[in-house]
Image: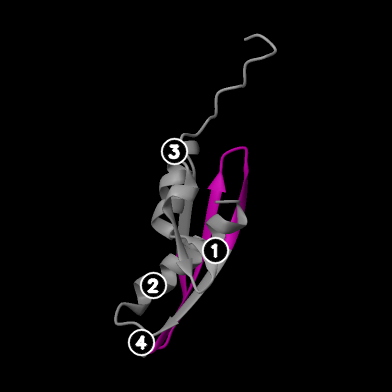
Amino acid sequence: MDDNQEPQSQSTFEPARYLTKVGSADYLEVKWRLVWLRETNPDATITTELHSHDGQEAVFRAEVSIPGGGSATGWGSEAADDFRDYLEKAETKAVGRALAALGF
């Protein structure tokens, strides 16, 4: 490669294409963060744990680890009054927060 060429990007994922608005802020849905993660780090691991559940509210902890690239933890909670599938929503929120902490 000569000095005038730019290095090729490791990722072809373009997060800006998938942004949605939440209020007035741009937001990248967790499903797209996961696509981005897997494209750039196929060996990354995601671990989730149900921290507490009382039948009406759930709290999840998620950890995302990139081999040789760090790790991050995220927490998410949701209540049955807010979402029918509040368990899934709480887990997804935790994963999304861990991914955001890693820059996704």
Indicate the amino acid at tag 2.
Lys
Q: Could you give the CA–CA distance between mark 3 and mark 2, rounded to whole angstroms?
A: 24 Å
Q: Could you give the CA–CA distance between mark 1 and mark 2, rounded to whole angstroms?
A: 12 Å
Q: Could you give the CA–CA distance between mark 2 and mark 4, rounded to whole angstroms?
A: 10 Å
Q: Are marks 1 and 3 in contact (CB under 8 Å)?
A: no
Q: Could you give the CA–CA distance between mark 3 and mark 4, rounded to whole angstroms?
A: 34 Å
Q: Which residue is mark 2?
A: 89
Q: Which residue is mark 1?
A: 97
Indicate the amino acid at tag 3.
Glu
Indicate the amino acid at tag 1.
Arg
In primary-sequence order, the first of circles 1 and 3 is 3
Nearer to me, 75 or 13: 13
Number of other residues with Cα within 10 Å of mark 3, as a class: few under 14, some 14 to 19, many 20 or more: some
Indicate the amino acid at tag 4.
Ala
Q: Could you give the CA–CA distance between mark 1 and mark 3, rounded to whole angstroms?
A: 19 Å
Range covered by the magenta-colored residues: 49-73
Q: Quadrant of residue 72?
A: bottom right
Q: Are marks 3 and 4 in contact (CB under 8 Å)?
A: no
Q: State whether residue 19 is above or below residue 22.
A: above
Q: Which mark lies nearer to you, 3 or 4?
A: 3
Residue positioned 62% across, 41% down in the render: 69
In primary-sequence order, the first of circles 3 and 2 is 3
Taking the image as shown, residue 102 lies to the left or right of residue 76, namely right
- Place of residue 66 in the rendered image (x, y in percent of width and height, measured from the top left): 56, 43
Q: Which mark is residue 80?
A: 4
Q: State whether residue 40 is above or below residue 4.
A: below
